[in-house]
């Protein structure tokens, strides 16, 4: 099932995985973090070019295997699945899935489907059941969201950019390993209708006609859920372990996605600092360290550290006629070494975290992993109205750190979930 | 900017028009769409129920609506009665087709081909759309550049 460990390895970084010592200089000044060796609860992950033709910058990818429930032969391993601590549940693009997986239905026999909300768009399609495995961890009859519009047309109420094409998503799917058990949770189990807390993102489909799918209530058991919570032993969370990389970046980086926290010798929590998060995975971050607090999250699915804006950071955003999309990033005249303060969701505890912001226009076009890529968040921070802007600790935060994500309601020695730790 | 408090009883006393009473007590809970006017209330969001707060300024008014899903939506109306900006925050994203109204397709076109990797910052000559967050925590705002009243900083739209 596993691809050869050297498949994606940049020559310079294979040593990091093999001997557990980061190679390259750390621009954050951290001591090298240990990267778990292959084991039953360790999956290889990579930050690299990604799908052919994409050239994904700071995408963290894994292979997952799905099988027709009960079968050991009707299986498919899917590569380039984005590992995302910002969501929960497995979404696979229908265009890459060759298996015929059984549909999930409600108690009237209507097929269930979902409009999955991502920050940049939506993924629409039916819910299906599969036996799932990654490393040597397995889940029988996992609910998988298959994103495709061929079985049922996308309802008009499913809004946002359609990301069901691999060229738009930039990946073959999303492995959501966030702090939540389900992608929605109790609100989606409430009866739909006027004044309901149910957001109506799950649908029952009685026909393939336009609007043949209507919002419906689904039990927690039928919701798209964090697969880690169903593992037999290592079910309370994950660790993402990526080595430090040079400030000029790296063409590809290998790391480990470790399952379980404190469940085996290779996934102990010490000496990480625990930051408690709310039920939506949020904590608090102050930048500068004595500044006002922003609601914050750690998100391996965000490809940069997105925070504040030019007005508040005094760092200009990039501008290029050749690459208009570059305005999503900061372009300081020289690399900025900054410090922010991370606090738990109640504003308690906390520690200072250093990070770097390089000029995104100066980053090497031959590299796809950068620990110093940052950009503006979407909201201003001045004033008193809602919300303060989000501080999005994206993938650059993960290089040179072992980042723990504990799942809500799951016990970890000495700590109740959900929390993040690093 | 004067803040009028949350209690619906108070709202009942101070609201000069029945527009938002319809929101509170009507059978078609809804919100207005970007670029629409107050009369487009009644054709909007399924989940928006209660008008929780209204702020009035010389140039505009801000109406905050709360959905039972936990998501809050703010609508900014100019003195011409037209919605020139919307903002939202909460565990579920509101229906963007209904919220952006006639500008929804413009947003889709501009967002097309963008690879999903982080916050959305679309800045067109007439329309700005910002979105950030992650699953279960969404934030966004959109405004019509030419309709923002003079003297109001766009930083105030949120």
Image (tube, coloured by chain):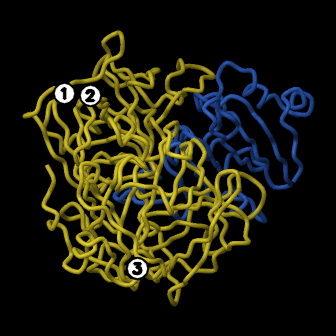
Chain colours: A yellow, B blue
Q: Is residue A411 visible?
A: yes
Q: Return the disc, 2 or 3, that comes first in the chain's sequence.
A: 2
Q: Nearer the viewer, residue A353 or A50?
A: A353
Q: Secondary structure at mark 1?
A: loop
Q: Are marks 2 and 1 in contact (CB under 8 Å)?
A: yes
Residue at 88%, 41% in the rendered image? B4
Q: Chain of mark 3?
A: A
Q: Is residue B146 visible?
A: no
Residue at 69%, 33% in the rendered image? B39
Q: CA distance from mark 3 to mark 1?
A: 51 Å
Q: Return the disc, 3 or 1, that comes first in the chain's sequence.
A: 1
Q: Report the side of A268 relative to B151 (left or right).
A: left
**Residue beneath disc 2:** A141
**Residue beneath disc 3:** A321
Q: Quadrant for the N terminus of chain B, please.
A: bottom right
Q: Nearer the viewer, residue A100 or A309?
A: A100
Percent coordinates x, y for residue A130 in the rendering = 23, 31
Q: Residue furthest top?
A: A108
Q: Residue furthest bottom?
A: A334
**Residue beneath disc 1:** A69
Q: Report the side of A311 relative to B52 (left or right).
A: left
Q: Which one is in front in this view, the residue at disc 2 or the one at disc 3?
A: 2
């Amino acid at each position: 099932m596993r691809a050869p460990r050297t498949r994606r390895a940049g020559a310079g970084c294979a040593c990091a995985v093999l001997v557990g010592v980061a190679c390259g200089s750390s621009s954050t000044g951290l001591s090298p973090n240990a990267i778990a060796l292959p084991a039953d609860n360790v999956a290889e992950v990579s930050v690299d070019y990604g799908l052919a033709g994409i050239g994904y910058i700071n995408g963290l990818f894994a292979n997952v295997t799905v099988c027709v429930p009960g079968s050991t032969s009707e299986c498919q391993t899917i590569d380039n699945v984005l590992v995302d601590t910002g969501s929960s549940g497995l979404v696979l693009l229908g265009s890459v899935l060759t298996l015929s997986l059984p549909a999930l239905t409600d108690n009237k026999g209507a097929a269930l489907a979902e409009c999955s909300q991502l920050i940049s768009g939506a993924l629409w399609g039916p819910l299906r059941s599969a036996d799932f495995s990654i490393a040597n961890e397995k889940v029988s009859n996992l609910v998988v969201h298959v994103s495709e519009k061929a079985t049922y047309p996308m309802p008009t109420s499913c809004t946002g950019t359609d990301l069901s094409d691999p060229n738009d998503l930039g990946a073959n799917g999303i492995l959501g390993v966030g702090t939540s058990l389900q992608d929605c949770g109790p609100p989606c189990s409430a009866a739909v209708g006027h004044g309901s807390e149910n957001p109506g993102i799950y649908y029952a489909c009685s026909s393939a006609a336009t609007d043949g799918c209507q919002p419906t209530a689904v039990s927690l058991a039928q919701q798209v859920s964090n697969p880690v919570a169903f593992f037999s032993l290592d079910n309370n969370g994950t660790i993402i372990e990526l080595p430090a990389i040079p400030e000029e970046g790296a063409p590809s980086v290998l790391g480990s996605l470790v399952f379980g926290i404190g469940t085996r010798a290779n996934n102990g929590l010490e000496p990480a600092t625990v930051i408690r998060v709310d039920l939506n995975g949020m904590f608090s971050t102050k930048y500068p360290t004595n500044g006002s607090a922003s609601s914050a999250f750690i998100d391996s699915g965000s490809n940069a550290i997105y925070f504040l804006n030019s007005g508040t950071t005094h760092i200009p955003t990039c501008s290029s006629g050749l690459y208009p999309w570059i305005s999503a990033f900061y372009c300081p005249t020289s690399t900025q070494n900054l410090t922010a303060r991370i606090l738990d969701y109640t504003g308690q505890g906390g520690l200072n975290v250093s990070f770097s912001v390089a000029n995104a226009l100066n980053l090497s076009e031959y590299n796809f992993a950068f620990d110093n890529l940052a950009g503006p968040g979407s909201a201003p921070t001045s004033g008193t109205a809602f919300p303060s802007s989000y501080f999005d600790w994206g993938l650059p935060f993960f290089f040179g750190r072992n980042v723990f994500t504990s799942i809500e309601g799951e016990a970890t020695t000495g700590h109740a979930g959900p929390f993040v730790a690093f | 900017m004067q803040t009028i408090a949350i209690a619906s009883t108070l709202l009942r006393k101070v609201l000069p028009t029945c527009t938002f009473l319809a929101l509170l007590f009507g059978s078609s809970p809804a919100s207005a769409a970007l670029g629409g006017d107050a009369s487009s209330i009644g054709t909007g969001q399924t989940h928006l129920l209660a008008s929780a707060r209204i702020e009035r300024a010389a140039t505009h008014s801000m109406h905050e609506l709360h959905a039972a899903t936990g998501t809050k939506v703010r609508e900014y109306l100019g003195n011409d009665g037209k919605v020139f900006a919307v903002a939202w925050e909460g565990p579920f994203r509101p229906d963007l087709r209904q919220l952006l109204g006639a500008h929804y397709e413009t947003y889709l076109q501009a967002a097309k081909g963008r690879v999903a990797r982080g916050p959305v910052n679309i800045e067109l000559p007439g329309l700005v759309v910002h979105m950030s967050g992650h699953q279960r925590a969404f934030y966004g705002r959109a405004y019509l550049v030419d309709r923002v009243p003079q003297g109001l900083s766009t930083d105030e739209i949120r």
